Image (spheres, rainbow, N blue to C red):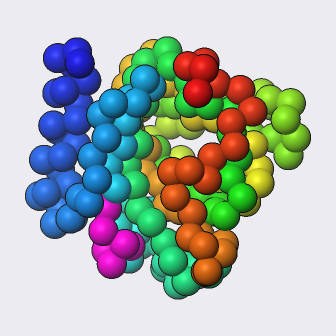
Amino acid sequence: MSDQKKEIFDGVAQRLKIEGFNVVNRDETRPWGGFFVIDEDQAQQFANVYFDGLNVDELKISGKLSPKILIVAPKTRLSWQYHHRRAEIWRVVNGTVGVSISETDEQGDVQQLAPAQTIKLKQGERHRLIGLDDWGIVSEIWQHTDPENPSDESDIVRVQDDFGR
């Protein structure tokens, strides 16, 4: 792992600790960067800090929310994907990132999101997060849509992937 990537991850970990978040998973192994998963019991606290106090009760679809921090390396793209059991809301924390969304498998135009900008992704909507010139840090809340079968990392349908996954 590059020194810069380690520095970014350690900085985010330190910030989350200072903010009082319990990190339940830290994954630095993704070819595009990685993520931190925050304790679901802290969803409202996470929304207070990372989504300007958004009321998580208004976000709940099936009752379960999962907060995460995504870290995207420069010049990398996550897969062009969608999910069967979740919608998502993203807000840029640091850096500028690209986002492409579409109702179909045809990838849409890339729009740039700067810090504090938010985007909502519907269940089944195709989307891709893209690292641009610098490291991007994005807060994310999964809105689980099936109370009997909450979404997880296997709930990814990849339409296209730069890393052959």
Displayed quadrant of residue 29 = top left
Q: Nearer the viewer, residue 145 or 46?
A: 145
Q: Name the magenta segment's main secondary structure.
A: helix
Q: Is residue 49 above or below residue 140?
A: below
Q: State the image coordinates of residue 103 (x, y, percent, origin top left).
A: 85, 46
Residue 112 visible in the displayed image: no
Query: Up-down: is 22 above or below 34?
Result: below
Q: Which residue is drawn at 23% across and 31% down?
A: 8
- Which one is in front, 108 or 48? 108
Does residue 160 lie above or below 121 as drawn?
above
Is 139 colored magenta in this rendering? no
- Res 158 → quadrant: top right
x and y, in percent, of residue 102 in the image: 81, 41
* Residue at the image position 86 percent from the left and 30 percent from the top: 106
Residue at position x 58%, y 27% in the image: 165
Point out the stretch of residues depicted in magenta.
38-43
If the image is split into quadrants, where does the N terminus sit? Answer: top left
